[in-house]
Amino acid sequence: MYVAFGNNIVDSNEIKDTIEKNTEFKIIKDMSKGTKRDDILAYNLSINTKVLNMIIEEECNLDDLTEDELFEEYLSLAEEISTEIEDLLPEEAVLDIKAYKWDESENAIKLIIAIAHEDLKESKMRDIMKRLATQVE
């Protein structure tokens, strides 16, 4: 799918490939059509908890965390790491990222990322993220 991005046209498949090749994230689904806009890219992502565990273990022992604490740590760390994606995007890009689920059967944290041109108002990005959140599992 092609998306208007400022004065340029961006291929969502190229962005998808760039994210998968340069990060630990896997693209579950291209959700760009689900935004119902022609100027926003959106993806459902996942990151393996093994990757997150290695980072967490640098600061504390996993066994010292309760399941709730580990869940919170996974979500916040996944969101923090996903901001690295911004470095792979056009300079004018802004992101909104939301980790929403620990899928224990896949040992992964699932996230939604919306990417837009910097001219898009922050309130519109929040509305888009709400819409996308209703579309995932």
Image (spheres, helix red, strand yellow):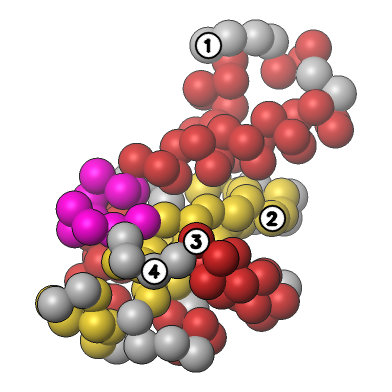
Q: Earlier in the sequence, mark 4 or mark 1?
A: 1
Which residue is depicted at the point 31% across and 61% down?
A: 118
Q: Which residue is mark 3?
A: 122
Q: Earlier in the sequence, mark 2 or mark 4?
A: 2
Q: Which residue is mark 4?
A: 120
Q: Amino acid at mark 2?
A: Tyr
- Whole-angstrom CA distance, mark 3 to mark 1, is 34 Å
Which residue is depicted at the point 36% across and 56% down?
A: 94
Could you tell me which quadrant the C terminus lies in?
bottom right
Quarter where residue 68 is shown: top right
Provide the secondary structure element on which disc 3 rests. Answer: helix
Q: Are marks 2 and 4 in contact (CB under 8 Å)?
A: no
Provide the secondary structure element on which disc 4 rests. Answer: loop
| Magenta residues (range) | 85-94
Q: Residue furthest left?
A: 8
Picture coordinates of residue 24 (x, y %)? 39, 45
Which label sits in the foreground, 2 or 4? 4
Q: Earlier in the sequence, mark 3 or mark 2?
A: 2
Picture coordinates of residue 3 (x, y %)? 27, 83
Q: Are marks 4 and 3 in contact (CB under 8 Å)?
A: yes
- Mark identifier at residue 100: 2
- 83 or 44: nearer the viewer: 83
Q: Earlier in the sequence, mark 3 or mark 1?
A: 1
Q: Is residue 9 above or below residue 130?
A: below
Residue 81 seen in the figure: yes
Picture coordinates of residue 99 (x, y %)? 62, 51
Quarter where residue 27 is shown: bottom left
Q: Residues within 10 Å of mark 2 (few under 14, many from 20)?
A: some
Q: Residues within 10 Å of mark 3 (few under 14, many from 20)?
A: some
Q: Is residue 13 above or below residue 71?
A: below
